Image (cartoon, rainbow, N blue to C red):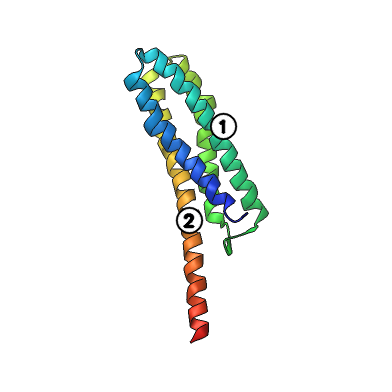
């Protein structure tokens, strides 16, 4: 059971980013009668998403630090930059970029920066998820190959 927790955390992180950023927020702007209403709701959703991202990333870091065996292997150190990068991007977006967007300060610049940071965070979460699931399937194949070799 505990071997699946990192995969579920990475899936929640990546999937929630995809759902909020690429589905829900565009639908708000397409269907709410005023752009200001959509923008206010989008800001609340992005704040909630920041906390989902932070919780998932922090739990993944705790598991990485504990070096518990996961699916026949360890979460490797090559996940560390992706998790920390995604976490830092979430926090920077929330506490450095979002206040400037809400203040309508150089809106084009800060909205663009926030969008780029969101997409890079989504990539960080996706790479984390990919590496966790790839390591699980690679480990399973390695164990199967070892078992087949020992029977010969």
At 40% from the left and 37% from the top, the residue drawn is 119
At 52% from the left and 46% from the top, the residue drawn is 10
At 42% from the left and 43% from the top, the residue drawn is 123
Q: Is residue 106 visible?
A: no
Q: Is residue 107 visible?
A: yes
Q: Which residue is most to the bottom?
A: 152
| Closest to the observer, 109 or 27 | 27
Mark 1, secondary structure of its residue: helix
Residue 133's disc is: 2
* Residue to which mark 1 is pinned: 51
Q: Is residue 146 above or below residue 92?
A: below
Left or right of 100 in this view: 71: right
Return the disc, 2 or 1, that comes first in the chain's sequence: 1
How busy is the neighbourhood of tag 2: few (under 14 within 10 Å), some, or many (20 plus)? Answer: some
Mark 2, secondary structure of its residue: helix
Q: Is residue 47 above or below residue 34?
A: below
> Mark 2 and mark 1: span between their CA atoms?
23 Å
Residue 72 position, x and y percent, is 58, 65
Q: Is residue 76 above or below residue 58?
A: below
Q: Are marks 2 and 1 in contact (CB under 8 Å)?
A: no
Q: Which residue is most to the front?
A: 1
How busy is the neighbourhood of tag 1: few (under 14 within 10 Å), some, or many (20 plus)? Answer: some
| Closest to the observer, 59 or 103 | 59
Residue 116 position, x and y percent, is 39, 33
Residue 19 position, x and y percent, is 42, 35
At 47% from the left and 16% from the top, the residue drawn is 102
């Amino acid at each position: 059971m505990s071997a699946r927790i990192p995969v579920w955390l990475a899936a929640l992180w990546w999937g929630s980013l995809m759902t909020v950023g690429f589905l829900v927020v565009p639908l708000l702007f397409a269907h709410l009668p005023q752009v200001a209403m959509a923008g206010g709701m989008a800001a609340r959703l992005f704040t909630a998403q920041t906390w989902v991202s932070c919780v998932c990333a922090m739990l993944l870091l705790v598991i990485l630090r504990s070096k518990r065996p996961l699916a026949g292997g360890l979460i490797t150190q090559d996940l560390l930059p992706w998790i920390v990068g995604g976490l830092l991007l979430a926090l920077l977006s929330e506490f450095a970029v979002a206040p400037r967007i809400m203040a309508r300060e150089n809106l084009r610049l800060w909205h663009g920066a926030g969008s780029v940071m969101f997409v890079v965070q989504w990539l960080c979460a996706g790479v984390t998820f990919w590496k966790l699931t790839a390591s699980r399937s690679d480990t399973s194949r390695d164990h199967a190959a070892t078992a087949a070799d020992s029977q010969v």
